[in-house]
Image: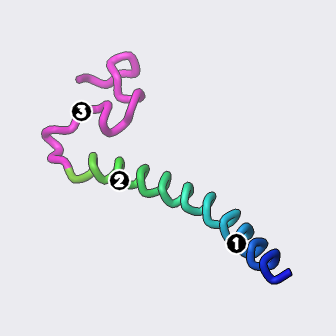
Amino acid sequence: MDTGIILGIIAILLTIAVPLAAFIYRRRKRLNSIYDVKWKSTAKLKPKEVMGERGSPNTGFRD
């Protein structure tokens, strides 16, 4: 009986920890990609690095 309780607690903790770890990983990855662009010199930035696909000649931005 004690083993079942311990396994239940471990299962509950894993159920909480796995999605939380995935959320933290995705958030850090997104923030790091933002700061990679942010710390570049403004003379070296391209419109696609800052605005993604919105910064293209088709939408009125020059390369």
Amino acid type, mark 2: Asn
Query: Which residue in the protein does label 3 denote?
Result: 46
Q: Nearer the viewer, residue 37 or 17?
A: 17
Q: Quote the CA–CA distance across marks 3 and 1.
A: 49 Å
- Sequence-wise, which precedes: disc 1 or disc 2? 1
Q: Is residue 14 above or below residue 59?
A: below
Query: Which residue in the protein does label 2 denote?
Result: 32
Q: Is residue 35 above or below residue 56?
A: below
Q: Quote the CA–CA distance across marks 2 and 3.
A: 18 Å
Question: Could you tell whether 2 is left or right of 26 in the image?
Answer: right
Q: Is residue 36 above or below residue 47?
A: below
Q: Position of residue 42 (x, y in %)?
A: 17, 44
Q: Nearer the viewer, residue 52 or 10?
A: 10
Q: Nearer the viewer, residue 51 or 10?
A: 10
- Residue occupying the point 35% across, 47% down: 33
Circle 3 residues within 10 Å: few <14, some 14–19, many ≥20? some
Amino acid type, mark 3: Lys
Q: Which residues are magenta?
A: 40-63
- Residue occupying the point 22% across, 53% down: 39
Query: Which residue in the protein does label 1 denote?
Result: 10
Q: Looking at this view, name the residue that lies furthest to the right.
A: 1
